[in-house]
Image: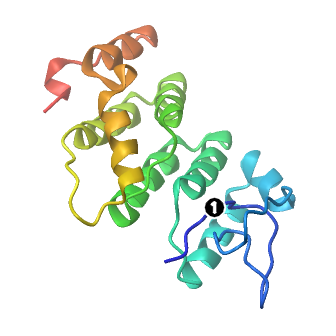
Amino acid sequence: MLSSKRVFGEERFGEQCTFWTQSCPQQEYPPTKEASTTAVGDVVTAQEIYLKMHNFGLEPDETTVHAIVDGLLNAGDSHGSITVVQDFFNQHSVLPPLWMHYKILELCLGQGLAYEAKRYVYFIQQLWKWEPNQYHDPKFVETMRAVQKSPGLQKEALQKLFAYFGEELKDSDFF
């Protein structure tokens, strides 16, 4: 199955490779307008490119979720970014880079959206309990283990982060 390698890079159709596949032999393409606009929060472009990927039957990867969530966060859409991360994890077994989990939480708390931050903490707790099966890619299992073991995503660290922003994350917020 083809997957996203350089989402939002150069777009090529027909006999040439598409901009998001691994079918291109070890070539890197320079960023295009799509990459630039998505990085500054052009969510519409991100959604259009993802829709193209989906219509071509291409599986998203870490790069895809990273680009789309980054665009949403840069536009200040913390609710949308949480939803995308949850959807990509549940539907495609894909997560953004580890540092992006912190960025989502910090943006929620910085915007005064404690409920959204707690919603993301609930999702993180689901990741703590995740176990691999025979269908999971070894790289994804490694990513999941890194998330599960990350000191910054443990209960005490999350409570400190909330306190820093003047919010309380109680023991009852954890299952």
Q: Give the quadrant of the C terminus.
A: top left
Identify which residue is drawn at 60% across, 65% down: 4
On the image, the x and y values in percent for residue 15 come to 77, 90
Identify which residue is drawn at 27% across, 66% down: 135
Kindly identify the amino acid type of the residue bearing the numbered disc 1.
Lys
Q: Is residue 68 left or right of residue 115?
A: right
Q: Is residue 1 above or below residue 150?
A: below
The colour scheme is rainbow
Q: Which residue is mark 1?
A: 5
Say which element carries label 1: loop
Q: Is residue 79 above or below residue 159?
A: below
Q: Which image quadrant for residue 16?
A: bottom right
Q: Is residue 60 above or below residue 113?
A: below
Identify which residue is drawn at 22% across, 64% down: 134
Q: Which sits in the foreground, 7 or 27?
A: 27
Q: Is residue 128 left or right of residue 114?
A: left
Alpha-carbon neighbours of circle 1 within 10 Å: few (<14), some, or many (≥20)? some
Identify which residue is drawn at 65% across, 71% down: 21
Q: Which sits in the foreground, 14 or 113?
A: 14
Q: Is residue 38 left or right of residue 59?
A: right
On the image, the x and y values in percent for residue 163 come to 37, 10
